[in-house]
Amino acid sequence: MIQEKYAKIWYNLTTMTNHIALFEPRIHFNTGNIARTCAATNTHLHLIRPFGFEITDKHLKRAGLDYWDKVDISYHDDLATFLALVNANQNAKLHLITKFAEHDYSENGLYTADKVDHYFLFGREDTGLPERFMRENPEKALRLPMNDAHVRSLNLSNAAAIVIYECLRQQHYQGLELVHTYEKDKLK
């Protein structure tokens, strides 16, 4: 029974992928935190130009991003290039993460028996996703509930982590260690 469960999870791991896409990210700390989350969760990271910072070895080392080479990452020159990639994938489902959406991110079924590649697109820290693009795609928009009377938005890296972990929860944490044993485990 347990072997069947893990065999099913392994099959889905090899047939579906989760993606986080950042539209014109401005703050390198947010991008670094999201990259770390992507490395920890086997999530593909897409960065859509232009950036508000430089991605060079010098900047990565200074920021302590020694895991950058462990991130499955793609760079896109603009939103149209990224969308062409998504649209070319017959199994892709695009989710626009915005505070203006009508539907809660956790209401959306993110696990199915069919292979579905989920692309979670986040906007710029200061302006979000382009308004026209949002108006043309309201059915793809998801929001994280929050009290926006007190704050205008959640931190981008926190929002990305919340969304990807909800997706992974619904997918039974495919490909991740549910129990980790440390060589020098202090809890034993």
Image: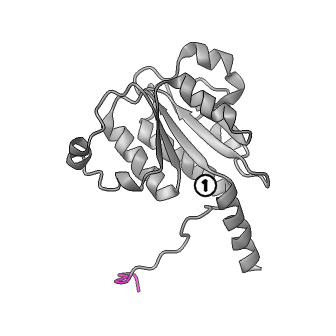
Label 1's element?
A: helix
Q: Is residue 90 above or below residue 173?
A: above
Q: Determine the image quadrant of residue 178.
A: bottom right
Residue drawn at 43 percent across, 52 percent down = 71
Which residue shows up at 20% across the image and 44% down it?
A: 58
Judging from the image, the colouring scheme is one colour
The residue under label 1 is 168
Q: Main secondary structure of the magenta part?
A: loop
Looking at the image, residue 157 lies above or below residue 78: below
Q: Which residues are magenta?
A: 183-188
The front one of 136 and 150 is 136
Relative to the observer, which residue lies in front, 129 or 159?
129
Point out residue 139 in the picture as x, y percentages from the top left corner. Answer: 72, 26
Location of residue 118 in the rendering, given as x and y in whole percent from the top left corner: 64, 43
Residue occupying the point 74% across, 39% down: 90
Identity of the residue drawn at 37% across and 54% down: 69
For residue 97, say whether it is visible.
no
Residue 139 visible, this orientation: yes
User: Residue 128 placed where, x, y %?
Assistant: 48, 23
Quarter of the image with the N terminus is bottom right
Q: Is residue 187 magenta?
A: yes
Residue lying at the far bottom in this picture: please name it: 188
Say if the magenta span includes residue 15: no
Q: Residue 22: horizontal and vertical position, in percent?
A: 47, 34
Name the residue type under label 1.
Answer: Leu
